[in-house]
Image: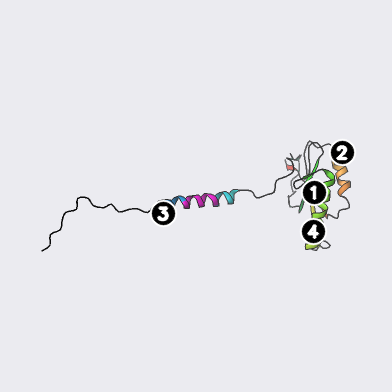
Amino acid sequence: MRHRRPLLHRPTPRRSAEAGLLPMINVVFLLLIFFLIAARLTPPEAFPVTLPDAAQTGLAEDGRFTLLLGAEGEVGYGATTGQAQALADLLSDRAAWCSATDCTSAPPALLIRADSMAPATALPGLMRAIEGMGFAAISLAVVPK
């Protein structure tokens, strides 16, 4: 019969450091996925626009191109400000879009987001400037009442 010597101290099993980090990594990835899904991925506008109120609903903001008219009468398109540069960028983007799609059968639409405090003379001048650009429909965005 063999005699074993009693152990004075039993070695404790060692836990690996990776086992403790795995749940934290999972939580970080879940938070990352949540914030990616919850975030709005739209390009920034050139300046903020407060839309006017309207008594009727029915306007859907589905315009392919969006032009901004600010409270001081400034014009913006994308991140570009200034009427001449904004309209030039709009026209070049329309030409690029028409080269990729058939604009004769389905011309693009234009959505104008005008600030409610924009000068009354700014909108007719802007409409004259975009009149011959070849948009099928020009819509004015409003807030439904």
Residue type highlighted by circle 4:
Ala
Q: Quadrant of residue 13?
A: bottom left
Q: Dot 3, how many residues are within 10 Å of its Cα: few (below 14), some (14-19), or many (20+)?
A: few
- Determine whether, in the image, residue 52 is placed left or right of residue 36: right
- Image quadrant holding the N terminus, namely bottom left
- Check contact, mark 2 vs mark 1: CB within 8 A: no
Q: Amino acid at mark 1?
A: Ser
- C-alpha distance separating marks 3 and 1: 58 Å
Q: Give the numbered dot on residue 139.
A: 1
User: Label 2 vs label 1: CA separation?
Assistant: 17 Å
Magenta residues (range): 25-32
The image position of residue 53, as x and y in percent, is 75, 39
| Mark found first going from the N terminus, 4 or 3 | 3
Residue 98 found in image quarter: bottom right
Q: What's the magenta bit mostly, secondary-structure-wise?
A: helix
N-term-proximal mark, 3 vs 1: 3
Q: Residues within 10 Å of mark 1 (few under 14, many from 20)?
A: some
Residue under pointer 2: 121
Decide which of tag 2 and tag 1 comes sooner along the chain. 2
Q: Do the residues bearing badges 2 and 4 touch, measured as CB atoms within 8 Å? A: no
Q: Are marks 2 and 3 in contact (CB under 8 Å)?
A: no
- The secondary structure type at the circle numbered 1 is strand
Amino acid type of disc 3?
Answer: Glu
Q: Which residue is mark 4?
A: 96
Return the residue at label 3.
18
Q: Nearer the viewer, mark 2 or mark 4?
A: 4
Counting from the top left corner in percent of width and height, residue 131 is at: 88, 50
Along the polypeptide, which appears first: circle 4 or circle 1?
4
Relative depth, front residue between 78 and 16: 16
Residue 42's label in the rendered image is none
